[in-house]
Image (tube, rainbow, N blue to C red):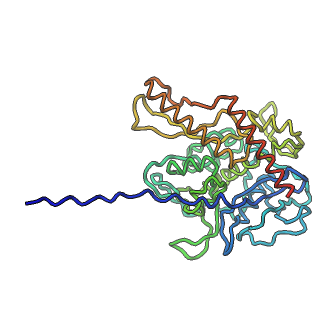
Amino acid sequence: MATAAPPTLQARLPPPKQLLELRSREDIYFLHPGYDSHNTLLSLPRVDSTTSTYGVHHRTALLACQIIAGNAFTNSYLAFDKAGQQRVQVPLDDILIDRQYYFIVEASKLYPIVPSFQDWEFPHGRIPDWWPSIITASLSTIDCGITNAGYAVEEAHIVPKEEGVWYRDNEMKKYGVDPSDIDNRANILPLRKNIHYSFDARWFVIIPRIVTTNSSLQPSPQYVTHIISPNAAELWPTYHTTLVGSLYTKSYAYLFARFAWAILHRIKLFVIAGRRRHVIRISRDEAGNIEYKTEYCTGTELENLYGSGGSKAATPLYPRKRKSGRGSTAHDEVIFAESSGDSDIDMEDTDSLWEVMSNSSERGSNRRQESSEETAPGTKVQLAPDIEADLRAALRKSMLQQQEADSED
């Protein structure tokens, strides 16, 4: 008797590549009224939809500008003109759709700005009321707090671990769960590896928005993701305004600091544009006491402090592999390390540059592991210094020219 042929297996195709629509939209620009050129403080992608177009959540954009201006929460607003006479009338929970806005601080046209996260003072007792504590805490430490995945999950720090000095200086332990150091549970969010990478690359933040959920049609403030980089274009259709779980009650303070950490990195181009700036900087006396002082710094001073290799330069993170034991692959994990140099360009381009360096590092690491079992964990391969410097210089020049052209428009 003839044997029936086995059924033909139908292979599943990979999901289709998503159209990177977000990258095709022009950013919205927020300008400083105290400067006639090179005055773009911040740009944000159009990630929030209206009935006819895309823009950005007004309250979120305003908060970003307020933090840049040294926590100017009560005396600031957005306007269409430099003098601040044409005040934006869009409700705070609605969407901004115009090309550019001026950020106005009342009675201070040339208001100072905070040039880096390390110079920013946490506003204890002054966080805006709409940024609430987390009433219903979801304490799962197993599944990803954003994707709900139970695999490839890592512990992500909300206030980044490398900001330990800032954490100590700003007494952030008061929001922690015992022990209240930077590794405390309220400062940890379980995230799937790819989401962890995007979080540490400053592609998105976590903010409160007035939303409805499947369990409640009554609008209420909930913590959701908010994308701030066009490099998250593939994440945007699925993971913009996604509810975030696995948060502790006092995680709200760490999320506020994380928001500032991500936003203040995006003003680096404004800081190192070669222009004299009015800034707020941290100062320490011989006894270690801290004071935040306003001062004017020249373009050269700011470049030396916050440009490539400067003491306050913000560095993106990139992943490299670390093994828990020699010859073992069972416990490989991805860690996020600071790069050895700094990018002189905007965040949207630093993402791409450091991704290239990251891939180069990982490929080099794999080759070394194949050739020698004595490879030290955490060894990194980097671009040659002269090549890296040339890349940064070229990218910076291009971005400065573009920003100047945008400002003149």
User: Residue at coordinates 70% horizontally, 41% vertically from top-left?
Assistant: 166
Q: Is residue 217 left or right of residue 339?
A: left
Q: Is residue 78 left or right of residue 320?
A: right
Q: Vertically, is 28 above or below 200?
A: below
100 or 58, which is in the foreground?
100
- Identify the image quadrant of the C terminus: bottom right
135 or 279, which is in the foreground?
279
Q: Vertically, is 243 above or below 271?
A: below
Total labels: the figure holds 0
Residue 381: percent from left, percent from top:
57, 30
383 or 116, which is in the foreground?
383
Q: Vertically, is 353 above or below 251?
A: above
User: Residue at coordinates 74% horizontally, 59% vertically from top-left?
Assistant: 63
400 or 197, which is in the foreground?
400
Residue 318 figure quarter = top right
Q: Vertically, is 382 above or below 70?
A: above
Residue 89 figure quarter = bottom right
Residue 173 figure quarter = top right
User: Residue at coordinates 66% horizontally, 46% vertically from top-left?
Assistant: 172
- Identify the image quadrant of the N terminus: bottom left
Residue extending farthest to the left is 1
Q: Is residue 216 left or right of residue 35?
A: left
Residue extending farthest to the front is 2
Residue 177: percent from left, percent from top:
57, 49
Residue 181 visible in image: no
Q: Is residue 306 left or right of residue 356?
A: right
Residue 228: percent from left, percent from top:
67, 56
